[in-house]
Amino acid sequence: MSGLAACAVATDDGPTLAQDRDRALERLERAAGGPITLEVGTTGATRVLAMTPQLPAPGRAADPAVAAARFLAEHHDVFGLGADAAASFSVDRVDVDGAGAPAAC
């Protein structure tokens, strides 16, 4: 997966949410073996999570929709989501990038 974009519901948990998100992002970077860019909106909601194609997060699912749902469930803290909220997301479409790699949206 070369990139993943999602919206998360903003909360007023302030520093605790940011600290939890930072720790979760560090764990994800260790798993991916490289830097990951996280963009947070003005409300505190995660807007974009991007990683380079050369350093993908380990995955086991061949179907991009299944892989995206599993990724979100396993890394819900990066998005500032609880496990139940992450489980409620669904894939709307699967796009194919210029190199032919699918990406769930």
Image (cartoon, rainbow, N blue to C red):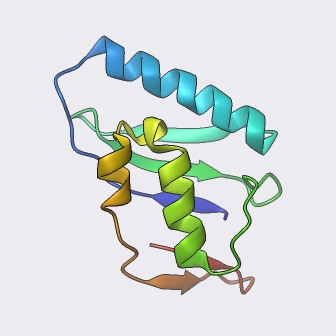
Q: Is residue 85 visible?
A: yes
Q: Quadrant of residue 37?
A: top right
Q: Position of residue 21 (x, y in %)?
A: 46, 27
**In the picture provided, is 41 more to the left or to the right than 105?**
left
Outermost front residue:
84
Q: Is residue 103 visible?
A: no
Q: Position of residue 105 (x, y in %)?
A: 44, 72
**In the picture provided, is 48 more to the left or to the right than 67?**
left
From the viewer's side, name the closer residue of 7 and 84: 84
Say above or below: 98 vs 49. below
Outermost top residue:
15
Q: Quadrant of residue 14?
A: top left
**Residue drawn at 45 percent across, 35 percent down:** 77
**Residue drawn at 27 percent across, 32 percent down:** 44
**Residue drawn at 82 percent across, 39 percent down:** 33
Q: Position of residue 11 (x, y in %)?
A: 19, 30
Say above or below: 54 vs 21. below
**In the picture provided, is 58 more to the left or to the right than 91?**
right
